[in-house]
Amino acid sequence: MAYHDACHLANAQRITAEPRRLLGTIPGLTLADVAEPETYGVDPVRRRTTFDLVMARIAGRFARMEPRATARAHLLGPLSSVERQDT
């Protein structure tokens, strides 16, 4: 089975051995590392488009603009292009 460390688990929490150890307990399973990709994550344009579609779907659940704007700001934070501090 090909295995690639989950980005957040490996980079932010520094957990890499435990998942492999757990998978190693499955009889007959052989692990193969996946080659490191050149970049992580998805295309930022696609990510933003998907975000806008999701916000359009949930916008009707907010009676007032302020809570909708607050929700949008909270959700956009992790998607921003600000340099990550946990690497």
Image: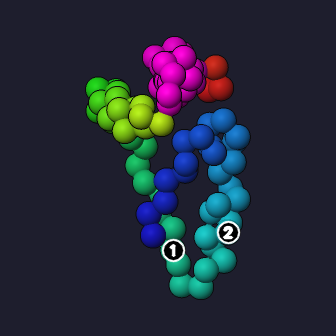
Snapshot quadrant of residue 77? top right
Would residue 38 be seen by someone viewing this image from the given angle?
A: no
Question: Compared to 37, does 17 lie above or below?
Answer: below
Near mark 2 (Cα within 10 A), the count class, few <14, some 14-19 or many ≥20, is: few
Nearest the eye: 24 or 75: 75
On the image, numbered disc 2 is attached to which residue?
22
Membership of 72 in magenta stretch: yes
Instruction: Determine the residue positioned at 56% across, 23% down.
Output: 67
Instruction: Determine the residue positioned at 63% across, 72% down.
Output: 24
On-image quarter of the C terminus: top right
On the image, numbered disc 1 is attached to which residue?
30
Nearest the eye: 50 or 59: 59
Near mark 1 (Cα within 10 A), the count class, few <14, some 14-19 or many ≥20, is: few
Instruction: Determine the residue positioned at 62% across, 63% down.
Output: 20
Read off the magenta span.
62-84
User: Please, what secondary structure does the residue beneath circle 1 have?
Assistant: loop
Membership of 23 in magenta stretch: no
